[in-house]
Amino acid sequence: MPLESPKRNVTDAENKLRLLCCVDALGSVTPAQLWPFVASLELMDYIPMQLLLHELMADGDVETGTGALREQLFLTQPGRAALRLFDGRIMQSDRQQIQAAAAPYRTQLLQKARVQAVYESAQAGEYRVRLCLQEGELPLLELRLSTPHRDMAAAAIAHFQQQAAPLLMYLYGLGDGASAPPAKERAALSTLVTHSRHEHMVTAPLPHPQAEILLSLLLPDLATATAYQEALARPSVAQAAAQRLVALLCTP
């Protein structure tokens, strides 16, 4: 009967680096989403993970976002520096395992969120697509793109599932620190619809020379939604957002 090798003793310091590596590989993840990922790789048990994650946050190596991203975990600059400095303390096999599992896990999260990318109209000179990311009854993100360029519409359809998470992270960050613009600087009016205490939908047109883009984003509180609406009222912010969306969706 073959003897099993004793399980390697992993220090708390190495497990902290493993968690940093997981958050870095996943890009954006909540604590509730991080645990199934850690468990699937058998990196550590639940209680040690929670304690070490709390220490990383207390030490400033990991932080949560603000506004609509307040439940998302991100590496801070000190966290990235620690990961680079002490990278050699993580076993190569652990690092490779984390990197290999991250992309499929992100795909699973997106599939649970019901990603939809469909043509609403496809005629010569007029291509309209609807791109939607939805978890509950309301869409988290909806983009309606109308363009005369067939290649642009096809690229948006093809790339949306892969780019949905980066798009959402970018868009949620637009409202941070926003203030109301002067009336003379206001862009086309956006709308804000409150569905419930924690569901506020902002809808705004984003100007782009090659497409008409209508953005709808679900935000968790009225203050965040108002800040977001004020940010998109600035023509420079709305134009930059349109350029960024097209670059993520339509650039090979």
Image (spheres, rainbow, N blue to C red):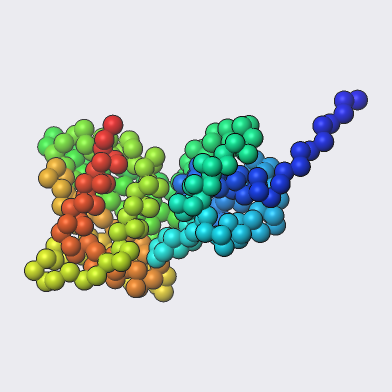
Residue 118 x %, y %: 31, 42
Query: In the picture provided, is 183 more to the left or to the right than 152?
Result: left
- Look at 14% across and 42% down and name the residue there: 210
Q: Is residue 179 visible?
A: yes
Q: Nearer the viewer, residue 25 or 215?
A: 25
Residue 247 x %, y %: 25, 41
Q: Quadrant of the N terminus?
A: top right
- The quarter of the displayed image where residue 14 is located: top right
Q: Nearer the viewer, residue 250 or 143?
A: 250
Query: In the picture provided, is 69 more to the left or to the right than 39?
Result: left
Residue 35 x %, y %: 61, 51
- Look at 63% across and 31% down and name the residue there: 93
Query: In the picture provided, is 199 more to the left or to the right than 180?
Result: right
Relative vertical location of residue 227 with respect to residue 79 in this rendering, above or below: below
Relative vertical location of residue 35 with respect to residue 91 in this rendering, above or below: below
Q: Quadrant of the C terminus?
A: top left
Residue 80 x %, y %: 48, 47
- Look at 57% across and 39% down and name the residue there: 87
Q: Is residue 105 visible?
A: no
Q: Nearer the viewer, residue 62 or 162?
A: 62
